[in-house]
Amino acid sequence: MKTLRKFISIFSLIVWLHYGTIHSNSLLITGQVTDQTGRPIPYAEVFVPKEEIGTTTNRDGLFVLKISKGEQITLKIKHSAYNPLVLDLADKNDFITIKLKQKVYQFNPVTIEGNLYAKEKLSLPVSHQLISINDFPNSGNSIAEKLDRFGIQLKDYGGAAGLKTIASPTGYGEHILVMIESIPLNSPQNGGVDFSVLPRELFSHGEFYWGHGSSLYGSNAVGGTLNLMVNQKQSSSFSLSSGSFGEAGTSGKISTMLGPAKISLYGNNYKNQGNFRENNHFYQTSFGGQVQLPLTQLWSLSFFTLNSNTERGVSGSVQWPSPNAQKDNLQGIHLASLRGISYFGQTEIHIGTLSSDEHYVDPDWMTNTRHRTSSHQLRTIHRFPQWKIFRNTLTLETVRHHINSDDTGIHQRSRSAFGLLNQLTVQRYLSLFTCIRMDLSRESKPVTSGSIALIWKPEKRLIKSILINSGTSYREPTFNELYWQDPWGSTGNPDLKPENGTSMDFAVRIDPLQSSAVEVEMRGYHFYTKNLIQWTEIEPLVYSPKNLSESVSYGSSVKMIISPRTIPVTLTIMTDQNKSRVLSKEDGYGKRLLYVPAVSHWAEISYQFGSIKGNVSYRFLGKRLYSYNSGGILNPYDRLDLSIRIGGPKLFWFRPNLDFGVRNLQDRKQESVHGYPEPGRTYFAKISTEISNPKNSIE
């Protein structure tokens, strides 16, 4: 608490210094940007050309601008999915409502809903990728299949019951920070995230930021950051799904208005027998809810909760089968957010509680363990109005982790952090970013991370943007790495140091035809990591983690999006070349990093005409190393998927939809992770209906 009070004092001092020079001839403009139906448009650009001062709307479409008084004020409002608008205002402090008209495309436009710092993707000093989650159907129940796209590799441990974890260009999945609405989701016990337990219908999209991110987001952001955004669509629905290997599921969502509040309740029941392997079943029951409550014209409050109960058979690898192992897990995610604008800028306050109660039983290995973890986090993000050529974003946060595990014992860990992102507008299209963050805790030494970036973003030119950035990152040791003890003698290491990383990133986006029909992004990157934590054998079959290695990973990628105006087809292709190796003269010296392919290719064709959507996706991952000890190589992995969605006509309040498709159309018998075979060709289908009642629901 003493550390938190210091941060509050620093925050107050910065506010006082920032506004100490404000004089009486300034004018405050507040307002909201919406579409023609009154639905807020998040993260639209609001700009005053005369003074070259601008901002973006927040999640609720609200904005605040402080400018000099004048006889005439001109605002320019832009958003990628809407027609731009130029508006002349009177010289007075009024709240204004601005309505934009949606652009007309042959297919539905993508709405970018922003990110942690309320900035559009080209204005954040990290390479960015938007991943739509519910644009096309896919096999299974989770978001895992939709995240595995365009350079983001998910390791699949076999069918619906297998873990779904993300791979990092630095070789360690724990190096990817995963967040839900800017609250970290990584387990304090093992550092990873299992995406198989997150129902895809609850999320609208994911935002992936390549490279270092600790200075912006905190621990675990050594190789990248994934921020999952909750689906805000206010409509009711019901669906039935079925597929291969005993897949069956039902889900439903009810949305209504209760006074000024928008309320949604969600329920899901899913099962998959996974009978292509023994003991590979997966059952899930989950329920959740959302509340969006406007407090005033400028402030709003929202809640999100998800409670999931999963039961699965843990079949183990082919070499080490577990024909009778079972794992049950009760998981809870509870988030509350307060957002608004004021004279001092845009403010977001997020409170999150994450909990997990896991019970693992394997009678063949005489294992019966229980692990309970909980994390409580408070994060405040404040974005100051632009002052001359400066724009600052301040973050304050505190987090407390607790674990009660049969293998690690009972432990607690607390950490507080202070971060400052500064944007210096050199000229209209050129910005310089500097970011610094300090993390403090009683259990370890302070950790400082920082970054610097340069972004050039002209308008209506061949080159759409150039991004150059460099920074540092880190990862804290997990509870398992610090305190692990098992009956066979393996133990943790309380003296572990945090892993440290540096990275550089260069990205260029061009529009060769200057018509938005073709867009090309070229990217080069370099990662260097030291103090890598590896579990090493200290005696036969007895392991302990140590800070052993240094590693390097560098490469380049090219991504092209072709969307002709004459036909409703979008083609996206990407290729990535990577070189990596272990630098330390320890275990694995000179070898490639684990699960980092030297070459990978991705392609996707999307089609939409009327109510019919189609999608064909292909991925190829070259040979990958899966173990330093054995030097084993995993064979190339490739997969072709097909999905189709047919929307029916609207009948009264109901709009039926039919989804169906095939995963692994070529029926490849292969492994995403060594020793864990995936199912072959998998068919899936879903019948759903959207329900919209104009009296109590908003589409």
Image (cartoon, helix red, strand yellow):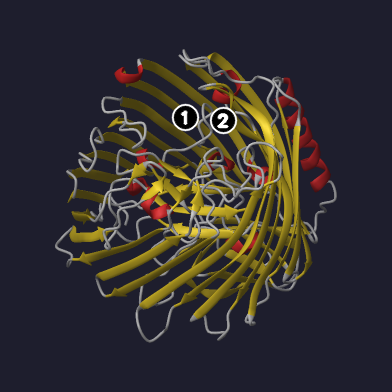
Q: Nearer the viewer, residue 613 or 120?
A: 613
Cα separation, mark 2 vs mark 1, equals 9 Å
The answer to whether residue 368 of the structure is visible from this angle is yes
Q: Quadrant of the N terminus?
A: top right
Amino acid at the residue labelled 2: Gln
Side (left or right) of 512 relative to 529: left
Left or right side of 403 for 382:
right
Marks 1 and 2: in contact by CB < 8 Å? yes
Residue 35 found in image quarter? bottom left
Looking at the rendered image, the quarter that the C terminus falls into is: bottom left
Q: Which image quadrant is residue 426 in?
A: bottom right
In depth, the one of 534 and 374 nearer the eye is 534
Residue 604 position within the rendered picture, expressed as x and y whole percent measured from the top left: 39, 68
Pick the residue in front: 686 or 523: 523
**Whether residue 120 can be seen here:** no
Q: Residue at x 79, y 41 (%)?
A: 14
Dot 2 corresponds to which residue? 377
Amino acid bearing label 1:
Leu
The vertical placement of 72 against 243, above or below, is below
Tell me residue 372's x, y (percent).
Answer: 44, 20
Q: Is residue 265 above or below residue 528?
A: above
Q: Residue at x 58, y 27 (%)?
A: 478
Q: Residue at x 26, y 58 (%)?
A: 667
> Which residue has dot 1 on it?
354
Label 1, secondary structure: give it: strand
Decide: few, some or many residues near mark 2? Use Cα within 10 Å; few <14, some 14-19, many ≥20: many
Relative image position of residue 554 (x, y in whole percent):
66, 57
First along the sequence among labels 2 and 1: 1
| Residue 541 in the figure: left or right of residue 506 | left
Q: Secondary structure at mark 2?
A: strand
